[in-house]
Image (cartoon, grey):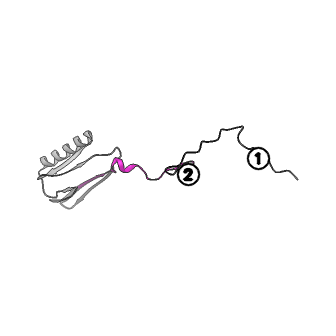
Amino acid sequence: MEMEKDKVELKQAQSLKTVINYLEGLMEGFKAGSIVVEREGEFVTLAPAPLVEVKVEARRKRDKEKFSLELSWTRQGDLDSPVKILTRPPQKAGTTAVKPEKSGASRKKETPPAKK
């Protein structure tokens, strides 16, 4: 088992009953919106997002079988894009906003070019 800041990792043989308990705890954590992985006082708390990327792999080679499940998501606050699409340039700090023109009378009508 390897522990780093914000990481808890385990790779070792476990009984089928223990694996089932891990999966049930994972399922309950997803339902509750919080997954806490803890061992020996070290823990990581995860908050599953509404959109989860899923990678599943199942293999059999001779007498060895393997099933891998990888789940990942982007934290909720990280979904906000730093890019904005506007209809006007943004106002600089300390400036006053310009009021939009009213449609109709205050607009200057353009005269179409004369036909030759």
Residue 65 in percent (x, y) is at 20, 57
Q: Residue at x 86, y 51 (%)?
A: 115
Q: Earlier in the sequence, mark 2 or mark 1?
A: 2
Q: Nearer the viewer, residue 37 or 109?
A: 109
Task: Assess disc 1: are there few (<14), some (14-19) or many (≥20) residues with their C-alpha within 10 Å of its C-alpha.
Answer: few
Location of residue 61 by image quarter: bottom left
Q: Nearer the viewer, residue 21 or 60?
A: 21
For residue 90, side relative to residue 20 (left or right): right
| Residue 110, label in figure | 1
Q: Quadrant of the N terminus?
A: bottom left
Q: Secondary structure at mark 2?
A: loop
For residue 37, side relative to residue 50 (left or right): left
> Is 69 contained in the magenta span?
yes
| Residue 89, label in figure | 2
The magenta stretch spans which residues?
67-89
Q: Are marks 2 and 1 in contact (CB under 8 Å)?
A: no
In the image, residue 2 above or below residue 47? below
Q: Nearer the viewer, residue 24 or 61?
A: 24
Work out which residue is located at the far front of the displayed protein and give it: 94
Task: Assess disc 2: are there few (<14), some (14-19) or many (≥20) residues with their C-alpha within 10 Å of its C-alpha.
Answer: few
Residue 56 in percent (x, y) is at 29, 53
Q: Residue at x 17, y 47 (%)?
A: 22
Which amino acid, mark 1? Glu
